[in-house]
Image (cartoon, rainbow, N blue to C red):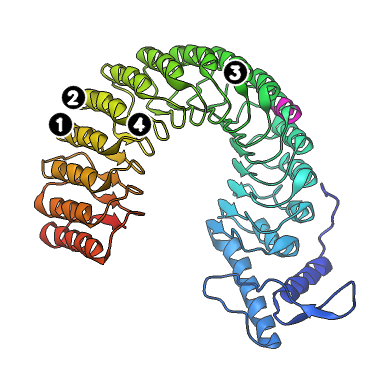
Amino acid sequence: MVCGMATNSLFQRTVIWKVVQNMIPGKKKDQNSGESAPSGIMWSFAAGSNLSTPTLSAEKESRKNLNKFYKEIRTSKTVNMAGRQFGDEGLFFLAESLAYNKSAEEVDFSGNGITAVGIEAFDGILQINTTLKTLNLSGNDIGDEGAKCLSDILVENFGIQKLLLNSINIGDEGAKAISNMLKKNKSIRFLQLSNNTIDYSGFASIAEGLLENNLIRSLYLNGNYGGPLGASSLAQGILGNKSLREIHLHGNGIGNEGIRELMSALSAHKGKITIVDIGNNNISPEGLRPVASFLKRTKSLQWFSLCMNDISDEGAEKVAEALKDNKTISTIDLGGNNIHSKGVSVIAETLKDNAVLTTLDLSYNPIGSDGVKALCDVLKFHGKIQTLKLGWCQIGVEGAECIADCLKYNTTLSTLDLRANGLGDDGAICLARSFKIINESLTSLDLGFNEIRDDGAFALAQALKANEDLAVTSLNLANNFFTKFGQVALSEARDHVFEMHEKEIDIYF
């Protein structure tokens, strides 16, 4: 046994009884006082099950639910048991079924109160099960010891390709154990370790694992504590790994120094990196120099996020310049970067000759009406943007007028996010007028949090009724200020479109 626990039949029967006892409502004995104390969680394993019955019937129902669960694991292809809180004892009972399952490819045990002790339930099970492809243990407090145990088990597993270990309270020691497993494992391609407490030492360990692993494709380390030193160490692992395709490092405090090392490694990488997330990493305009250099050189990158940094207009100009030479990026997220109209204007000019970029996120930037005007003047007749996100951009009514005018001519935009821009009734009325012009591309419009009242609701409702060729299928108006009259008008417009054209429009308010 890898983790040191023998699971004989007597132990299994004991576990089953303990799980059933935990599920019985009523009273249980307090181990410290010797007195009876109220029981804790009322267990409910399946939707609609009710265990608040007398003790004997509850015991019977609990056993029935456990057996149902057990059977589900043995026979289902996708098993979702997230948030059931069955704990370590329940896992020992349920995990055994995986040894007999020849069809389950995905198992979700996230959020179940599992600790390092429970991980031992997989010992001997995962070594013989090669059918299981995805294992999700996120949200369980397994810690470093649990990570070590699981890593020892997975060294001899040849089936699991996708391993999710987010928020499991592991630090550098757990990261080191996982790294050692990566050096030997022959199946894992997708690894999530986000929202843990991995420091630069753990990043260095993972880098060592990457140097000896030639299978991993996606690595998630969001929300850890890598810092500049961790990024520098990880850069060496990335440089020496040709299989890696996705790297997610959102929220690691990498800073300009760490970004310099990381971008240098990505620029020299011999593989095909397609996704890079370096959002929320304290990157300033100075840090954009190596980033821009990477964007110019890459021949494979498709999705890139710089969100929630502080690149400002100066950094936006560097990104725009890099996009002139890039022919692969289809999605870029620049949200929350203190970009104003000047920076947006430069980005807009780049879109004239860019036929690849289809998703642009500029949310949470104070671009104002001037920035929107510069963007819309280009998007009227140029570019291939299909998804445009401008939530929380302070565009106001003047910005809404620019967008309404753009929608009359644009033929590519399908998803538009304009949340929280202070549009009010006047802005909604401007957009409603553009709906009356045939637009065969826009299918989703988000106007939530815009202080729109009944007048705006009436205008939008009338526009939906008037345009028989309107392409919109989703209209989000949540968190505005409609009375029941505005709500009725929108509901009637939705029903009218369905009755007259047999077309469904989802309207949220």
Residue 41, magenta (yes or no)? no
Residue 203, magenta (yes or no)? yes
- Which quarter of the figure is the C terminus placed in? bottom left
Q: Which residue is mark 2?
A: 381
Q: Which residues are magenta?
A: 201-206
Quadrant position of residue 169: top right
State the CA–CA distance, disc 1 to disc 3: 41 Å
State the CA–CA distance, disc 3 to disc 2: 37 Å
Q: Secondary structure at mark 4?
A: strand
| Frontmost residue, 46 versus 223 | 223
Task: Using a 10 Å C-alpha cutoff, classify the residue at mark 1 as few (fewer than 14 neighbours), some (14 to 19) or many (20 or more).
Answer: some
- Marks 2 and 1 in Cβ contact (< 8 Å): yes
Query: In the image, what residue type sits under mark 2?
Result: Phe
Q: Nearer the viewer, mark 3 or mark 4?
A: 3
Q: Position of residue 159 (x, y in %)?
A: 62, 43
Task: Using a 10 Å C-alpha cutoff, classify the residue at mark 4 as few (fewer than 14 neighbours), some (14 to 19) or many (20 or more).
Answer: many
Mark 3 or mark 4: which comes first in sequence?
3
Quadrant position of residue 412: top left
Q: Secondary structure at mark 2?
A: loop
Residue 425 in view, yes or no: yes
Mark 2 or mark 1: which comes first in sequence?
2
| Frontmost residue, 500 versus 206 | 500
State the CA–CA distance, disc 2 to disc 1: 7 Å
Q: Secondary structure at mark 3?
A: helix
Q: Which residue is mark 3?
A: 256
Mark 4 or mark 1: which comes first in sequence?
4
Task: Using a 10 Å C-alpha cutoff, classify the residue at mark 2 as few (fewer than 14 neighbours), some (14 to 19) or many (20 or more).
Answer: some
Q: Which residue is mark 4?
A: 359
